[in-house]
Image (cartoon, rainbow, N blue to C red):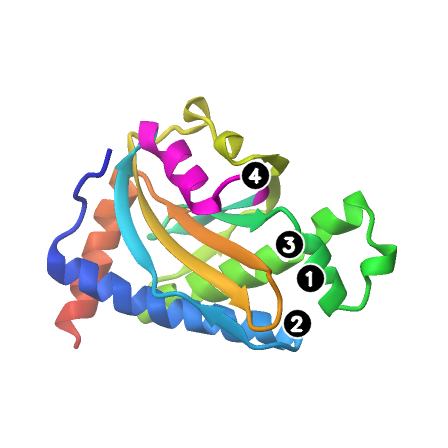
Amino acid sequence: MTIEFIGEDQREALQEVANIGMGQAGASIAKVLGEFVELSVPQISAVSAAGIPAALAALAGDGVASAVRQAFLGELRGEAIVIFSEHSAHDLAELLACADVLDGPAERELLLDISNVLVGACLGGMAQLLRTTIGFSPLSLLADQVPTSMLLQADEISARCALLVEVRFRLEKRAFRSHLVMLMADDAVAALRRALDRFIEEL
């Protein structure tokens, strides 16, 4: 179920802030991988907790996927989830010239490392623009090669509703794709609205 969290001016400001943050994340990933990264324009929506699993499955598409989760803390708080398509780890390993030695644990470690760079650069950039501090919990593997419909279950979500900020990353010469989603509970979105209002006033 889609719901409204923020006003149109706030949505436009969030779109701008997210776009800049994603650009920083893309640049950081490109530096690590040595290859240009294409990014989609951030898509922002708000859904009820019951609708989050279906929303994530729709982003990931058919088949199986892996996902990494990381909480972010401070005035802006919530949880970032990075979704990787089925063959993402192998594609990344080929870029890093380590595909021949990549086993299960090493694949998962690679996904954690890429997620760490992506989330840190993106959310860190957003927090800087909004003039607020942000911290991060350690990353953890949310799902490892599971059907996309099982990436996140409703009973794993404590928030009544959440804000989804979805961006697709694609490598120019590879099939690699990942999706970054921010889940924010309704009380955290209130803090985000205040930060966006400050941002708008300072323009």
Which numbered circle lies on residue 88?
Answer: 3
The quarter of the displayed image where residue 145 is located: top right
Checking the image for residue 41, the label placed there is: none
Question: Residue at the spot x=81%, y=59% of the render?
Answer: 99
Secondary structure found at label 4: loop
The mark found on residue 33 in the picture is 2
Q: Is residue 92 left or right of residue 183?
A: right
The amino acid pointed to by label 1 is Leu
Bin the neighbour count of mark 1 within 10 Å (Cα to Cα): few under 14, some 14-19, many 20 and up.
many
Residue 150, percent from left and from top: 52, 29
Q: CA distance from mark 3 to mark 4?
A: 13 Å
Check contact, mark 4 vs mark 2: CB within 8 A. no
Q: Is tag 4's residue or tag 2's residue first in the polypeptide sequence? A: 2
Residue in view at x 34 percent, y 43 percent: 184
- Residue carrying label 4: 63
| SS for callout 1 | helix
| Of pointers 2 and 3, the one earlier in the residue sequence | 2
Quarter of the image where the N terminus is located: top left
Binning the other alpha carbons within 10 Å of mark 3 as few (below 14), some (14 to 19) or many (20 upward) gives many
Helix, strand or loop under label 2: helix
Q: Position of residue 90 (x, y in %)?
A: 72, 55
C-alpha distance separating marks 1 and 4: 19 Å
Q: In this picture, which residue range is highlighted in magenta?
A: 50-67
